[in-house]
Image: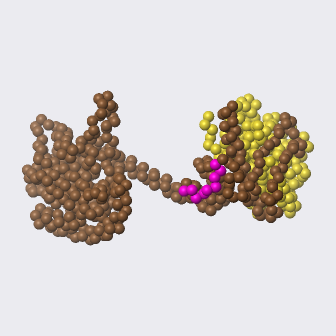
């Protein structure tokens, strides 16, 4: 979006944002951060545990102290700093604007703003009133519909003279780096005077872990807040904006969104909240599907009898033609699992190769013993020839490789001959194809 | 009865293991049960089945060799003399008394002097030269007569399958 098309003929589509671009997809985007996170993890967990206790106290303080008190504000700000949540303030709060509207970048946005200027946040969930009160939400009937919400908010503002209402018209947490979600208009209907608040959040390098990812749960976000050294939430109050006489609600909303976006140096996307939740759902189903596939592979059925293993060996051979069937089958005998054997093949644990089908290349001399030459019948065109009249050459084994008279070893001989027979014919078949191509 | 059958099967097993005919191998599936064998037959050269390695099962009756064994391909082979379920319809597997088709003379029938090896060699010759006069698979016989190119294509697809090769590109 921020990049202009290089040439005038370039399609506009190429520069268009996808809905997924508005969010962080992964916590760690570059490998250095990933490595660092792994090293930091033990320290992070200790800090996390420590901060959990402290967080509980902060929570108590926040509940007990009067919301508008100056002391509460300073106490909370200090405690939050210890918790790793550093709140920066820029710009001035304009008391005449009764509605604050901010962009949404983390689960603690409202906490950060609430510390700076105590405010009310309408609850969008049907949660018990005690919990709602603890978190500083007010029930404005958002679950019962937009009209209820707007009326509730208007009534509340009439009753409450000090605190403003805080609204996140985006309705969903974005990365705040690419574009804003299209604003919902309810907050702008409540009051014609609105103060936009821009919220930015960043973490010091190399703790560059995304504050929130698409579809993340609130407690994982909170875990990162506590485990990482600190996160800076900088809140900037922009000059208040007033709805003009001739302006429609949508136009006013769009104008506020533009102002906020230009302050953040990003743009306003055409995507609404429904697109965003659709994207989150899509991501979740994709992840579930991926997980299911992994689970399926992990629990690939244990191969019970020889027949299943034979079939499995032939299946694997299709994907790994360079390995000798016999080697695959022997490994299956050990692992009893298709996945395990495929992994062994990939990691090079199986070395016997049938690259060019030459028996002599095999390391196991038993294959030599097992070698069965190809059928070389000279088919005379004699219909219904009685089989006894056909001439057969018997394959004579070299004397040193005589099959023993011990019948219990014969089955092994059969198996080896079987795989060798398939391998040899396979090679013959492929050579035949090459010859045909040459002709 | 079963004792004699076992002894006879053991002798044949030894013969097939120590002096295997070209392109044919056979062995009991389980050493505890000598009446159920698996075998592999290489498709005869210069035919559309060439180089295919076709697996089949042979089931022996308790009164073997008085009664003939039954043979069934397990690879879904498409052939005029093989039933769609894989059973092989060949004169050597029929006892002299029963003649389902009326085409077979009794000297091609089963008798105790025949053997597994002879059965398998007969099957190889059957693969090379299908007999479409008394078809077990009517569709295969029809295709063999009328659309030989398609029959060869079907056979080639099976050959590739038995050799763990991916399906033909063309």
- Measuring 71% from the left and 47% from the top, which residue is drawn there? A424
Q: Is residue B80 left or right of residue A326?
A: right
Quadrant (top left/top right/bottom left/bottom right) for the C terminus of chain B = top right
Q: Position of residue A251 (x, y in %)?
A: 18, 38
Q: Is residue A145 left or right of residue A247?
A: right
Residue A429 in magenta?
no
- Measuring 78% from the left and 45% from the top, which residue is drawn there? A375
Q: Quadrant of residue A362?
A: bottom right
The one nearer the camera, B15 or A161, is B15
Span of residues in magenta: A347-355
Q: Is residue A298 left or right of residue B165?
A: left
Q: Position of residue A230 (x, y in %)?
A: 25, 62
Residue A352 in magenta?
yes
Main secondary structure type of the part rendered in magenta: loop
The one nearer the camera, B100 or A256, is A256
- The chosen color scheme is by chain
Q: Position of residue A318 (x, y in %)?
A: 61, 47
Quadrant (top left/top right/bottom left/bottom right) for the N terminus of chain B = bottom right
The one nearer the camera, A285 or A82, is A82
Position of A124 relative to A223 (above/below): above
- Measuring 67% from the left and 41% from the top, which residue is drawn there? A430
- Measuring 36% from the left and 64% from the top, which residue is drawn there? A39
- Residue B98 makes an appearance in the image: no
**Tally of numbered tags:** 0
Position of A108 relative to B136 (above/below): below
The hue of chain A in the figure is: brown
Q: Quadrant of residue B78?
A: top right
Q: Quadrant of residue B145?
A: top right
- Residue A117 makes an appearance in the image: yes
Q: Position of residue B83 (x, y in %)?
A: 75, 42
The hue of chain B in the figure is: yellow
Position of B3 relative to B48 (above/below): below
């Amino acid at each position: 979006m921020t990049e202009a098309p290089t040439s005038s003929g370039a399609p506009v589509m190429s520069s268009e944002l996808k809905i997924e671009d508005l969010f962080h997809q992964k916590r760690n985007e570059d490998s250095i951060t990933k490595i660092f996170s792994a090293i930091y993890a033990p320290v992070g967990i200790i800090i996390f545990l420590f901060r959990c206790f402290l967080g509980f106290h902060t929570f108590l303080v926040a509940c007990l102290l009067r919301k508008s008190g100056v002391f509460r504000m300073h106490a909370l700000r200090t405690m939050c700093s210890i918790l790793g949540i550093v709140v920066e303030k820029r710009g001035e709060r304009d008391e005449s604007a009764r509605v604050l509207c901010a962009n949404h970048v983390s689960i603690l946005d409202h906490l950060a703003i609430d510390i700076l200027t105590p405010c009310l946040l309408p609850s969008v969930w049907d949660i018990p009133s005690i919990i709602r009160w603890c978190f500083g939400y007010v029930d404005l009937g958002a679950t019962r519909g937009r009209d209820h919400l707007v009326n509730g908010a208007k009534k509340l503002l009439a009753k409450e003279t000090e605190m403003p209402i805080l609204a996140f018209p985006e309705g969903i947490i974005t990365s705040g780096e690419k574009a804003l979600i299209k604003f919902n208009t309810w907050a702008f209907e409540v009051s014609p005077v609105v103060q936009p608040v821009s919220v930015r959040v960043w973490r010091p390098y190399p703790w560059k872990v995304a504050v929130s990812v698409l579809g993340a749960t609130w407690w994982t976000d909170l875990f990162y807040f506590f485990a990482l050294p600190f996160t800076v939430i900088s809140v900037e109050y922009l000059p208040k904006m007033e709805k003009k006489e001739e302006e429609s609600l949508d136009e006013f909303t769009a104008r506020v969104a533009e102002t906020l976006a230009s302050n953040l140096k990003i743009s306003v996307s055409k995507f609404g909240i429904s697109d965003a939740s659709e994207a989150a759902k899509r991501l979740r189903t994709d992840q579930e599907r991926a997980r299911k596939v992994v689970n399926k592979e992990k629990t690939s059925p244990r191969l019970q009898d020889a027949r299943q293993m034979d079939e499995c060996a032939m299946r694997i051979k299709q994907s790994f033609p360079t390995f000798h069937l016999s080697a695959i089958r022997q490994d299956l005998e050990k692992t009893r699992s298709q996945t395990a054997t495929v992994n062994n093949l990939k990691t090079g644990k199986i070395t016997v190769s049938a690259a060019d089908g030459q028996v002599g290349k095999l390391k196991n001399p038993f294959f030599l013993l097992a070698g069965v030459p190809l059928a070389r019948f000279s088919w005379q065109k004699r219909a219904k020839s009685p089989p006894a009249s056909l001439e057969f050459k018997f394959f004579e084994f070299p004397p040193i490789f005589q099959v023993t008279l011990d019948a219990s070893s014969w089955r092994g001989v059969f198996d080896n001959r079987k795989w060798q027979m398939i391998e040899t014919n396979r090679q013959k078949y492929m050579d035949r194809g090459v010859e045909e191509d040459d002709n | 009865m079963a004792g004699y059958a076992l002894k006879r099967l053991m002798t044949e097993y030894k013969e097939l293991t120590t002096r295997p005919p070209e392109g044919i191998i056979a062995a009991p599936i389980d050493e505890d049960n000598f009446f159920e064998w698996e075998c592999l037959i290489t498709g005869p050269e210069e035919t559309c089945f060439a180089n295919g390695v076709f697996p089949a099962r042979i089931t022996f009756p308790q009164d073997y060799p008085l009664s003939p064994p039954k043979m069934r391909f397990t690879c879904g082979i498409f052939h005029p003399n093989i039933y769609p379920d894989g059973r092989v319809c060949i004169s050597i597997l029929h006892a002299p008394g029963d003649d389902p088709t009326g085409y077979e003379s009794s000297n091609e029938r089963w008798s105790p002097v025949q053997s597994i090896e002879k059965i398998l060699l007969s099957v190889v010759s059957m693969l090379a030269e299908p007999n479409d006069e008394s078809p077990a698979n009517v569709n295969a016989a029809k295709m063999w007569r009328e659309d030989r190119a398609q029959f060869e294509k079907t056979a080639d697809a099976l050959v590739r399958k038995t050799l763990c090769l991916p399906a033909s590109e063309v």
